[in-house]
Amino acid sequence: MDINIFEKIYSSLTKGNENIRASLAKIKTILADETRESNEMLKIYQKYVTNNENITKEELDQANKQFSDLLKGLGLAGVFALPGGLLAIAFMVKLGEKLGIDIIPEKYKK
């Protein structure tokens, strides 16, 4: 029996673990950014609703953009949860591109 086969299996598992860790770290960063941006959005909307403080058009545009991204992300998560959801998302993205509809949140385009 060739000992190299065990080394190859171990190497493959180690690389797989590194990829999983890197992916989880990236997801953690995305979720932390999303939470921070959503909190900022809620603060801006709270200022807007209470009229105690004036907000700029740029702040309102930023909050509206974040809200749009949040809805897009929730929609994609809902589709992903369905059987065959990954294929459905790919189809929706291609169809959206043809129709000129942007369904991917901005932060996932980077």
Image: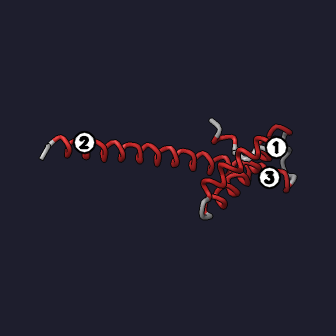
In x, y percent, where is residue 92? 71, 50
| Residue identified by numbered label 2 | 8
- Viewer-proximal residue among 58 and 18: 18
- Three-letter amino acid code at the position of disc 2: Lys
In x, y percent, where is residue 22? 43, 43
How many neighbours does mark 1 have within 10 angstroms: few (below 14), some (14-19), or many (20 or more)?
A: few
Is 75 left, or right, of 48 in this rendering? left
Mark found first going from the N terminus, 2 or 3: 2
In what element is the residue under mark 2?
helix
Task: Name the front one of labels 1 and 3.
Answer: 1
Looking at the rendered structure, which numbered label has been put on residue 99? 1
How many neighbours does mark 3 have within 10 angstroms: few (below 14), some (14-19), or many (20 or more)?
A: some
Looking at the rendered structure, which numbered label has been put on residue 45? 3
How many neighbours does mark 2 have within 10 angstroms: few (below 14), some (14-19), or many (20 or more)?
A: few
Q: Quadrant of residue 61?
A: top right
Task: Name the front one of labels 2 and 3.
Answer: 2
- Give the residue displayed 24% in from the left and 42% down from the top: 8
Q: In which quarter of the image is residue 57?
A: top right
- Three-letter amino acid code at the position of disc 1: Leu
Is 43 left, or right, of 14 in this rendering? right
- Give the residue displayed 79% in from the left and 54% down from the top: 46
- Viewer-proximal residue among 62 and 20: 20
